[in-house]
Amino acid sequence: MSKSRERALDHKCPNCGSKIIFVPGLGKWKCDNCKGEFDLETLKKFNNASSEENNKSEEIIEDINYIEYHCKNCGAEIIADENTASTFCVYCGNTAILKSKLSGKFAPSKIIPFKKTKDEALEAFKNISKGKPLTPKFFNKQENIEKISGVYIPFWLFSIESEGNINVHATRVHTWVSGNTEYTKTDTFNVNRDGKMKYERIPVDGSKRFNDDLMTSIEPFDYKEMVDYNHAYLSGFLAEKYDVSDKDSEIIAKKRADETTKKTLLDSVKGYTSTILKDSKITNNIENVEYVLLPVWMVNVKYNDKFYTYAMNAQSGEFIGDTPISKGKVVLFSILIFLAVALLIVLFTYLIYKGGA
Amino acid sequence: MKKIIIFIISFLLCIFPIFASEYDSEGYERNETNNYGVNKKWKVKDDNLNNIINTPYVDVSKKIYDYADIFNEEDENELKSLIDGFISETGLDFALVSVNLPYTNDEDYNYTYDFYDYNDFGLNNKSYGGVLFFINVYENNRIYISSVFGEAQLYVNEENNDVILDNLFDYFKGGTYKEGVISYIHQFKNYYDRGYDEDAYYIDENGSLKKNYSLPYAGGIISGALVSLLSMLGLVKKNKMVTKASNANDYLVSSSIEYLNKTDNLVSTITTHHIITSDVSSVGGSSHSGFGSSGGGHISGGRNF
């Protein structure tokens, strides 16, 4: 196990020097002490935000298991794992950004700032039971939340040009009657479709720590709100650096493009009674790869000694996660539905009987 | 003595017209004093009076009313003997009617209902149970009809009646009416011998066949369990929100879709054909339940031949 010592970066209020954090919804940085609000340009002016140059400066990262760093605010020594790019000082609560983790080859090109607040994430969790009658009664209580964190998750965005061809066995059936004879004509076709299409920014989660299915479930993100990356956006949030390379991630993006290309070509085979896909060949070429940070509220819940993880798309508000099922409610609802249906059938048949009678 | 003989002759001459007035050329006469010959519980009303008056008022002991004259005396005797046997064994009444009238199918059916209801057939049974077999040999619309009344419907329902009618088709198409009627009697008797489920059916006060209500245990349990299971699967699925993304539909640039080749080559054409067979049961009317102008229920069906 090896160690490296680094300096943590934090953000100070240009007015009073207190710590400032990015406020989702407001879209600005705010000082809790003097109540000052600052935009990115102001922070840059006071040299309190990163610039494009220092984002791109190459730094060599050692192969390490954890990092010891010193809080710039209180000087405390804090340990973080090798993938943590932004965290908090456990002693003074100051945001600590490990700049080196998001620099050089780990420097994201873009970021979508947090739009949904922690309170909105909490509210979404409280509403998790709505429309889910099998959820245990007290599951959505705030006391069950172990941890709620705003995390910038590393994503690879793949732009792909896809080209493919499909071969389809299709039939067209026509039936008509002449006199007392019914005729059925079946035309069989060999159908080919060649085509190409483009995909823009298919996201693939670049962190092993987060469940891939959970991350794809909170899609899509609106890339129109994506801005150039700046360390300043990380204040007040956790951040991760990627630990799955773009090469490893592109397999997932290509597989998704593959499916859609095949379906798009198949959808163009129209006017037939039946179609069977016999053969297909799809080629996907990566045209562009972007490394970006996307905002997610992670909510960790402990209920009956089991842990449940929820993710909220901090841009759209989509709140996703598997919810436990109460066995008691399953039994209760099964019995109630069974009795209701059985009673309805008895009532229905009796009314038919009475009507007939 | 002479006065007594004159008195007796005068008396007979006086009462003869009374007897004579009750018989027309084919049977009795219907008038207000005899409630138009309706001795069953059916009400004589303005809307059915015409039907009643136009229905022959017959001697129900004859059983065979061969107005179309399609049976010779020997045939009639043979059939009468069979019909009497049927009546004594089943307790159900029986009437065989043949006509040669330019009727539509509906008129034929109504004739059978009125003929049975407004004469004293089945009067010994609680629900006037019996059967009327009708043949109209009018050349443009030949039909035979089996109408089942009262308790007889417990033995021959709509489905059974259709089976019997279909089995008779060749007899009537071939003009062998007597054999057709004999077959009818035998088939009906067969169904009678099979009996019926006393818990399942009954005859109501109007003479209609009704099903007894029984709790649908099996249907209720199976449907309840099935709906409950499907509902639970649906509800459980609601709690499973995490799904695997398998496509990239959201990221496809629709304006970029370009088809480089679209070919649809015809490989083969196969044409098959089959002859549409006409269903004999659909010609003349499948058996159905209904009411005559009397308000009495029955099951009735027929076949044109």
Image: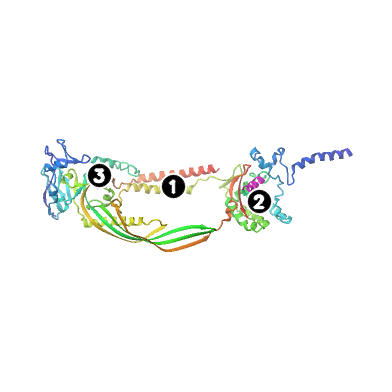
Q: Does label 2 lie on the same chain as label 3?
A: no
**Is A159 placed above or below A344 here?**
below
Q: Nearer the viewer, residue B130 or A183?
A: A183
Q: Is residue B109 inside the magenta stretch?
A: yes
For the point 17% across and 49% down, which residue is it? A84
- Judge from the rendering whether residue B238 lies leftward or rightward of residue B31; answer left or right: left
State the image coordinates of residue A219 (x, y, percent, origin top left). 27, 48
Residue type (three-letter) at the residue carrying disc 1: Gly
Q: Secondary structure at mark 3?
A: loop
Q: Which residue is mark 3?
A: A315
* Cα gap from disc 3 to disc 2, whole angstroms: 83 Å
Q: Is residue A252 visible?
A: no
Q: Does label 3 lie on the same chain as label 1?
A: no
Q: Is residue A332 inside the magenta stretch?
A: no
For the point 56% across and 56% down, which residue is it? B279
Chain hosting mark 2? B
Tally the marks.
Answer: 3
State the image coordinates of residue B162 (x, y, percent, origin top left). 59, 53
Q: Which mark is residue B134?
A: 2
Residue type (three-letter) at the residue carrying disc 2: Phe
Q: Which residue is mark 1?
A: B224
State the image coordinates of residue B293 (x, y, percent, origin top left). 63, 42
* Cα gap from disc 2 to disc 1, whole angstroms: 48 Å
- Judge from the rendering whether residue A121 lies leftward or rightward of residue B101; answer left or right: left
Q: Secondary structure at mark 1?
A: helix
Magenta region, mostly helix, strand or loop?
Answer: helix
